[in-house]
Image: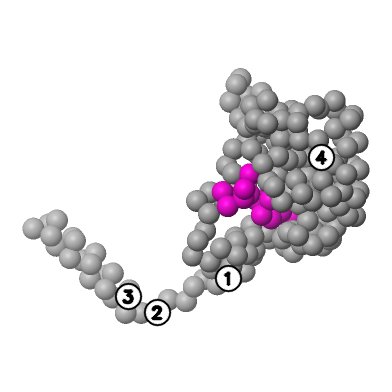
Amino acid sequence: MRVSQAKENILKRIRQALTQSTPVPFPQSEGNNTVFQPSQQELEIEFAEKFSNLLGKFIFCIDHTELTSQLNILINKTGWKNIYCREEKLKTILQKNNYSDFAAKDLGDCDAALTTCELLIARTGSIVMSAAQSSGRTVSVYAPVHICIAYTNQLVFDIKEGLQLLKEKFQDNLPSLITFATGPSRTADIEKSLVVGVHGPKEVYVFLVDEQLP
C-alpha cells in the first residue's frame, strides 16, 4: 500500500504541474537561433583559416585555368605519378583547361585522388561529401592524398545551414551517406600520441575556385 500511495502522490503532483503553465527560464536557448557568432570575415578566409589549422592545405584559384596550373605545379613538386579521378564531369573540366594526367586506373594504385564536394563549412573547416557524388563512398577515404575541387558558391558558414541546403537540394531523396571530413585522418589511440593518416588520407587539399559551381 505504501508503494501505491507514494506513486499516486507523485502522479497527483505531475497532474497538478501540467495544469499550470511555467515560462521557459531561458527562451534564447531553445534552439531557434545559432549559438555561434556570425563570421566577421569573408567565408573564404574563415574556411581557409580553420582548414589550415586542421593541417589541411588550401589553394585559392581565380578560375579553372589557374586551377589546372596550380594542380600541375603541385603534382610536379610532389612527384605523384598516378592521379585517380572517377568523376567524369570533373575530368572534362580539367581536360578543357590543359590537365589530363589521370594515370591511375584503380584507387588502390593511386598517389592521390581528385573529387568534388557538396559543400564547404567555413566555421569548422569541413568538406561535405555524399554518396550521391559519382566519386562514391570510398575515393576520399582510401586514397593516400585527397584533393577536393570546390567553388566559392559552395561555402556556407555553419553545419545547420549546410544541412538545410542539402535537404532543399535532395528533397525526399537524401543520400544514404553524408560525410563531414574535417582535415586529414588522425588518431591518438596509440599511446595517446597523435598520428595523422591512419584511418584515411594523410594529406587533404582544397582547391577553391572563384567561380560558380558548373
Percent x, y of residue 52 = 80, 42
Q: Amino acid at mark 3?
A: Leu
Q: 123 above or below 171? A: above
As drawn, which residue projects farthest toward the top? 191
Q: Return the x and y of residue 82 as percentages of the image width and height.
A: 76, 28
Please say whether residue 103 is one of the residues in the magenta stretch.
Answer: no
Query: Is residue 214 shown above or below 54?
Result: below
* Closer to viewer: mark 3 or mark 4: 4
Say which label, 3 or 1, has the lower sequence index: 3
Which region is colored magenta? Answer: 117-135
Give me the C-alpha separation between circle 4 and circle 1: 48 Å
Which of the two labelled residues, at mark 3 and mark 4, occupies the earlier sequence position? 3
Q: In this orientation, which residue lies closer to the viewer: 82 or 159?
A: 82
Residue placed at 91% from the left, 43% from the top?
69
Residue 38 location in percent, x, y? 74, 64
Crowding around mark 3 (Cα neighbors within 10 Å: few <14, some 14 to 19, many 20+) is: few
Task: Give whichever of discs 1 and 2 has the lower sequence position.
Answer: 2
